[in-house]
Amino acid sequence: MIPKKILVKDAHIVKIAVERENHIAQLINLDQRHPLASKIQEICNSWGISDHQNYALQFCETNNMKYVTEKNRNEIKNGSVLRLQYSPSKTASDTLETLINGVPLDKAQRLKELSSLSMDHTFALEFIKEKGLDILIKMIEDVNQKDEDILKYSLASFVELMEHGTVSWEVPESSFVARNIEIVRNFKKYPSKCGESALSNLENIVQSSSKYVLVAEEIKLQDILLLLQEDKMPVMRQNAIALLNALFMKADESRKRAIAHTISTKPYRLALIGNGLGTEMTHQLYVLQTLTLGLLEKRMRMKMNAQDQDAHEKIKELRRIAFDDYAGSLSLNDEHIRRGGSGGTGSGSGAGNVNFSQYYKKLGFKCDINPAQDFIETPPGILALDCMVYFARNYTQQYTKIVHENSCRADEHECPFGRTSIELVKVLCHILRIGEPPAEQSGDFQPMFFTHDQPFEEFFCICVITLNRTWKDMRATAEDFQKVFSVVREQIQRTLKLRPENLEDFRSKIALLTYQQITTLRQQERTSKEECDSTASAIVKLKEKISPQIVELIKQQRLSFLVEGTRFSKYVRGTRSKDKFWYARLSPNHKVIHYGDCDEKTIPTLEELPKKLPIIDIKQLLEGKECPHMKEARNRKSPVNFAFSITFESMDHSTLDFVAPDENIFNYWTDGINALLGQEMTSKQKKEDFDTLLSMEIKLRLLDTEGVDISKDPPPIPEDPENYDFCFES
């Protein structure tokens, strides 16, 4: 018999179509091992094109119009459609010719095409190599305002060409920077696309050029405000915020604070939030949020200085506001305390100091002798004191209520305001990543931080009230400090995920997340995760693997229970005989059941039990109404559910009848006897034990995968390589 010829598919060859304008497409086989130039020549020859060196292949997908090169040819797949076009160098030359010598209408059309072609890296390199960028810059600087299309498309082309990062932003001269500034400041006179491109250029100049000083001097915050108020121009607003972020990052400390102060005013806050926040817009607002909150870093990393008179005054102010009734009698001692060496916050001698120490202890400071010591740790440093004083000044009633409620408690459940506030500020700084640079891809933008001129301090005030409520709900003590903060951290993070629109919205949303609600959510998520994980194929296989071990463990426990033995009451026709008992136990070698009469208190040994039942003689286990001693039961209250009998081969008896004292012993004995007979254990207790032990064992084995999502299906096995000629470097 002649064997059939096996066709081996060559993985290097792809079947594609090549289009050309006004021509029928060619269907060809492209060998990826051969040079592209030879294949292009072959395609050109078939269409009668002689100057094949001026042609190239181009992808013609909606989201991919790149030229095909040796580097990206691996993106060509079976069924791909390519287009035969003029090569990048030919197109670049033709474009430059038109831009230099063409009429305005032709220039506008060429520039429109250029704005799309410039996205392609291969073309961009050719165009820049032919000095095309210099021509574009000159056009942008010199073009008349009436030639809107030329300006619009030349700016757009410049932006795309510079995006490739092959040309330094030092190349554009000051005149180019001034032209872009002029367009931004008079954006209403130009098409919106001109303003968008000019803003993008200025952003990059600020970030990457020494000429950023020109932008910082000429572009005022008022100019940016006007741009932000253009709700119908989302890209313009987005680029305006990006420029604001760039200026903010380049500014010195004093300038940063001036910018932050200005944009915290109501007109800027309203303009920043605006309408229709897209992904990129949200990211730019997140960056601005991170930069403005980042100004708190200096205070966050600053330890309290013993010579810092302002900080000492703030600590005394906390005491005075909380214990206002005592202010008159205490104020006379302030000067004495100051001379004592701790700025009036504790150290020194004298009777007045003892009183102050008591007040600082009631305020919840760890170091009540000198509370300044509590602000040495960084973070949160002196920022914690700033927040506490802000709360005391602006929410005096809530502040005094919290302090007095906790300082007057006679039990151990008081919530120390000082210590918890300092820790809370530390937690808030960590959640908001204060001191860290903005993430490149993050969009964790919180609109509420743009709805108040003191957003962080207001945020703290809401959270400290939540903290005090949660402490009460948990009936926490000092030992539960970290547990409380784990709950509070979760309350804050869950509420932030809801993106509250303003601080009042945050206040109302976090009020719903009580300790009880957090506990419920945690349990639901844990159960949901366990259910989800339990259906994963890897977990199912693991369960199948360890289930026999769990069953064997339960079996050994049941047999051990039988070896220990049980005292049973005697029953006649389903009625219990008063003060009559008998005892049964399994021999240690699991081969014989020993049984016999006993009293109510004594536990007989094996030797004291005269009767024996070899396991090998047992024929069957009967339960409930099937048992002989329950069939004639006259009393309806007879414990039928706990009755079981063993049938065996014997001259005088055919069954050994039991009535268990309770359900647990009934389950253990019936499971044990089934195990001895080599049958499946079927009790309800066995199922519960099995589920509990299996769940615990799975959790123990998966401890190392905590926080890792387990996919339901295993990852696919990769295809076999084309050959096994692997290269190993020694």
Image (tube, rainbow, N blue to C red):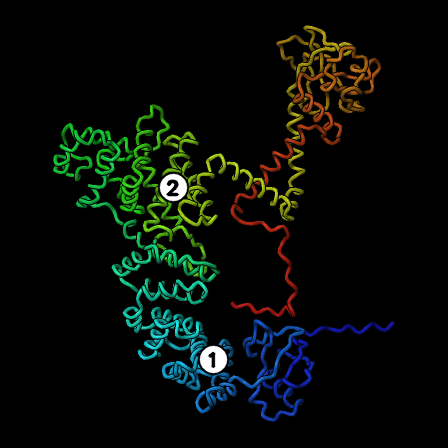
Check disc 1 and report its element: helix, strand or loop: helix
Q: Which residue is located at x 65 percent, y 14 percent?
A: 605
On screen, residue 539 above or below 670: below
Distance of label 2 from label 1 (alpha carbons): 53 Å
Quadrant location of the N terminus in the rendered image: bottom right
Determine the residue positioned at 79% across, 14% down.
Answer: 629
| Residue where numbered disc 1 is placed | 124
SS at mark 2 in the image: helix
For badge 2, the amino acid type reads: Cys
Dot 2 and dot 1 residues touching (CB under 8 Å):
no
Q: Could you say where residue 149 lies in the image, as x and y percent from the top left? A: 46, 80
Quarter of the image holding residue 271?
bottom left
Say left or right for 427 vs 117: left
The quarter holding residue 623 reads top right
| Tag nearer the camera, 2 or 1 | 2
| Residue furthest right as drawn | 1
Residue 102 located left or right of residue 691: left
Q: In the rendering, which numbered label is found on residue 463?
A: 2
Say which mark, if any, is on residue 510.
Answer: none
Q: Nearer the viewer, residue 397 or 170?
A: 397
Q: Nearer the viewer, residue 509 or 117?
A: 509
Residue at the far top: name it.
578
Residue 656 figure quarter: top right
Q: Earlier in the sequence, mark 2 or mark 1?
A: 1
Residue 216 position within the rendered picture, expressed as x and y whole percent measured from the top left:
29, 68
Q: Is residue 350 left or right of residue 411?
A: left
Amino acid at the residue labelled 1: Ala
> Is 167 rendered above or below residue 642?
below
Q: Position of residue 456 (x, y in %)?
A: 34, 48
Q: Could you say where residue 584 lies in the image, as x and y percent from the top left?
A: 69, 16
Seen at 66% across and 23% down, the residue is 588
Q: Say which of 306 and 438 sits in front.
A: 438
